[in-house]
Amino acid sequence: MSPSPEPQPSHRDPSERVLAVVPARLRSTRMPEKMLRRETGQFLFEHTVRNVEAAGVADRVVLATDSDKIGAAAREVGIASVLTAEAHASGTDRVHETVEQLAAEGSAFDVVLGVQGDEPELSAACFAGLVASFADPRVQAATLSSPLHAAHEAADPNVVKVVCDANGDALYFSRAPIPHDRDQAEDGWRAMQRHIGVYAFRPEALRRFTALAPSRLETLERLEQLRWLEAGETMRVVAVAPQPAGIDTEAQYQAFVSRTSGQKPIPTRT
């Protein structure tokens, strides 16, 4: 069963404190030091942090980085940051270290939202929907999905697909076309949902996630969220409208610069 896009999230519990962490590492394989690019007048990480702040769902927004250079840039523009280890395998690990550092300082939160620093254009509905999903006490972890918008995406391994149960919890994530359309209907791809890699956790669930060893399915698919499912845990999937692509390449960054100047429409993920 596929969730419907853009749910109207219920209001968050005002007694719950929400932390948003924006991981931003210095090195990137395809676009070195992209977080420090500033052709728009703002650092790339700055766009993401300000976008999360503008959504109004977090009590605190913190940049988590492995780089003194990024930390200095954050101080320059008045963004709070924490310095984390360089060796983290994923942004989720960096988010967890940030939560641990803040807890050691006496700051406690009920929900932790992680938004990668190269995702500057996600809608406020994404963040609101993720946070609102924790009104259900059964939810320990949550992520996002949206409809595919073209048939060719079904077979594209760079487009991660997710299938959900009747409660909206993930059954499986894959780079393969799922669910498989046995009858090969021409529009079978419309039943598929794209996974958008933004996550939210209760702090204890985040701790358990990062304590798990990489799993067999995670290693096969190169998808860290499968570690959680393979351990028997559940992940709520919040359906939203198609979202703008993240910034992974020089071409994507230049397109973002143009959009920021009002010259081009925002492309969705491909």
Image: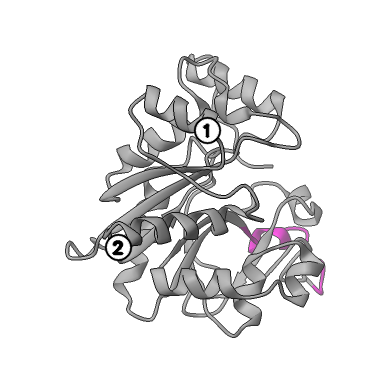
Q: CA distance from mark 1 to mark 2?
A: 26 Å
- Identified at 69% across, 42% down, the residue is 270
Q: Is residue 206 above or below residue 230?
A: above
- Identified at 50% across, 80% down, the residue is 166
Dot 1: element: helix
Please indicate, yes or no, whether residue 158 appears anywhere in the rendered image: yes
- Asked if residue 8 lies left or right of residue 208, the reply is left
Q: Nearer the viewer, residue 263 or 49?
A: 49
Residue 189 is situated, as x and y percent measured from the top left of the image, at: 71, 59
Q: Is residue 97 above or below residue 24?
A: below
Q: Which residue is mark 1?
A: 68
Look at discs 1 and 2 and give the one toward the viewer: 1
Q: What kind of residue is marked 2? A: Phe
Say which quadrant the N terminus sits in.
bottom right
Q: Residue furthest bottom?
A: 232
Q: Which residue is mark 2?
A: 109
Q: Answer few, some or many: residues within 10 Å of disc 1's Cα (few below 14, many 20 plus, some between 14 and 19).
A: few
The residue segment tinted magenta is: 182-194
Q: Is residue 157 above or below residue 213?
A: above
Tell me which corner region of the image, top left, top right, bottom left or bottom right, holds residue 118.
top right
Q: What kind of residue is marked 1? A: Asp
